[in-house]
Every structure is written in C-alpha cells, then in structure tokens.
Amino acid sequence: MSLSIHKFKHDSDLVDEFSRRICQLLEQAVTEREHAYLVVSGGRTPVALFERLSKQVLPWPQITILLADERWLSANDANSNERLVRQHLLQHQAAAANFISLLTDADDAHEALDELNQRVAVIPCFDVVLLGMGEDGHTASLFPDSPEAELEHALNTSDPVAAITPRAAPYQRVTLTRSRLMHSRIIFFQLSGTAKQKVLEQAVVPAAGLPVSRFLQQQEVPVEVMLATPEE
Ligand SMILES: O=C1O[C@H](COP(=O)(O)O)[C@@H](O)[C@H](O)[C@H]1O
C-alpha cells in the first residue's frame, strides 16, 4: 500500500508541516508545468491550514483551487464549503488564486451534473488533493449511507462529478468522484482527534469497505495521512 501516516501531537505542528509540504508541491508544479491544481475539502478540520496557506507567498495567479465536494446550498450559505474556502483560504496572498466553483443555479444537484462534468473534465491531473474524513468513514461527499446506486456510481464512474444524497448528513451534495480524485499526483488526508484515528485504523483493515478505504487501500496514487491526536 502506498500509504504513509504522519502523527502530530498538536494541530499547530500538523499545520506547520503540512503547509510547508503543500507549498513545496505547488511551487514545484508551477516550475515544471506553469500551473498548479489544488483540491481542498470543506468541513471544520482544514480551517487553520487554509488560514496559514492564505498568507504564503506563492505564485497564486498560476494556482487553481477547487473543492473535493460541495453541499448543495447557495455559495453565501454559512454551511457551504465554497463560503468556507472564500472566507479562510482565498484571502491575503491567496486572493490572487483562481477558484473553480462546484455550484450552479440548478435547484437539484442531479440537474447540475452536465455543466459540472464539463467544467471539471477539462482540468488536468491534480497536483495536490487534500481530503478529510468523517467518523462514518466518508470522504469528500462519498457517504456510506447514501442510496447504493448513487454511491456505487460515484465510486466507479469515469465522470468527474456525481450527486449524492446522504441519509444522515444534512444537504444534498455534489462530489468529485473516486476516479477524478485519483487523477492526482498525491492525495493527503488531514485528520484530527482520537475518534478519527480509530476510524482510520478500521478503514485500513483489508475487509473494511468504507468509502475512505477506497483511497487508503490502493497502489496507484501515493497517500499521506496527516494525523493530529492532541490529548482530549
Ligand atoms: O461534510 C463534510 O465533511 C468532511 C469532514 O468534515 P470535518 O468537519 O469533520 O472536517 C469534509 O471533508 C467534507 O469536505 C465536507 O463536505
């Protein structure tokens, strides 16, 4: 398994090391290919990392950022991932970055898929994908309790974007599919807390079958887990 796990005692140590790694990879991508593509996740975990990254001196006009998944809400809604990124990442130095939204005017996420698939299909291989993980083993918006047909589609299609309707988590979602997320030079997970550490331990067991396991247990793309387990 091309999986490595880096453990940190404090979230701040994780943010120091992780932002250094991401900056290095983005600079290298711009040097080698003139442009870098960074995929980020929503939720609460990456906020401090976003704020640190936003202040770094990088060739931001040559960096494009997009989300791994989006809640089907207005971009101004307090719970939208886009709003989180605009508020915490696309600020300071990083205000000069390009951002590709996963939202459209459609009422239902399924109706938006043609447009979103076209929007994302033209993006080349991602340079860095930053994923989170929920305590139910979801990553991006690949929720284990989604209707089976939706989840199977999102995990197996070659389309870049899929619609997901989780049963327990709020909001309809759109998510980059497994195949599109795997079209990356590297995938990172940022995790914090012993509850997520336990889910990670379950997810790497061969028979686990959680959506997140489909990224952790594969040989094609290197995966690095940045795990902070501050004493709780
Ligand atoms: O709903 C979501 O949850 C996951 C994990 O969020 P966190 O708050 O536990 O960090 C996140 O990675 C995903 O992008 C988001 O839509």
Image (cartoon, rainbow, N blue to C red):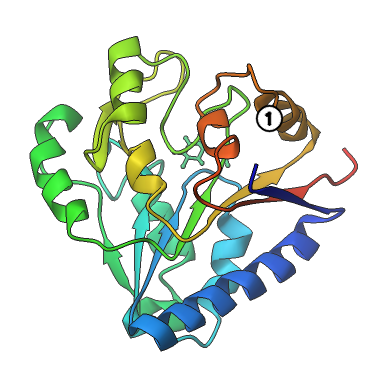
Crowd tier of the residue under label 1, counting other residues whose Cα lies within 10 Å: few below 14, some 14–19, many 20 or above? some
Q: Is residue 153 above or below residue 132?
A: above
- For image coordinates 45% across by 24% down, the residue present is 143
Q: Is residue 225 visible?
A: yes
- For image coordinates 57% across by 70% down, the residue present is 22
Q: Is residue 106 visible?
A: no
- Asked whether 190 or 187 is in front, the reply is 187
The amino acid beneath tag 1 is Val
The answer to whether residue 26 is left or right of residue 9 is left
- For image coordinates 63% across by 26% down, the residue present is 135
Q: Is residue 89 above or below residue 153?
A: below
SS label for mark 1: loop
Q: Position of residue 133 (x, y in %)?
A: 58, 36
The answer to whether residue 77 is left or right of residue 40 is left
Which of the 4 image quadrants contains residue 231?
A: top right
Q: Is mark 1 within 8 Å of ligand 1?
A: no
Determine the residue located farthest toward the right in the rendered image: 231
- Asked whether 156 or 49 is in front, the reply is 156
Q: Quadrant of the C terminus?
A: top right
- For image coordinates 33% across by 85% down, the residue present is 34
Q: Is residue 145 above or below residue 203?
A: above
Q: Quadrant of the N terminus?
A: top right
Q: Position of residue 148 (x, y in %)?
A: 35, 11
- Asked whether 153 or 43 is in front, the reply is 153
Q: Position of residue 88 (x, y in %)?
A: 49, 63
The answer to whether residue 173 is left or right of residue 53 is left
Residue ID for mark 1: 204
Count of numbered circles in the view: 1
Q: Is residue 169 above or below residue 73?
A: above
Q: Position of residue 6 (x, y in %)?
A: 77, 54
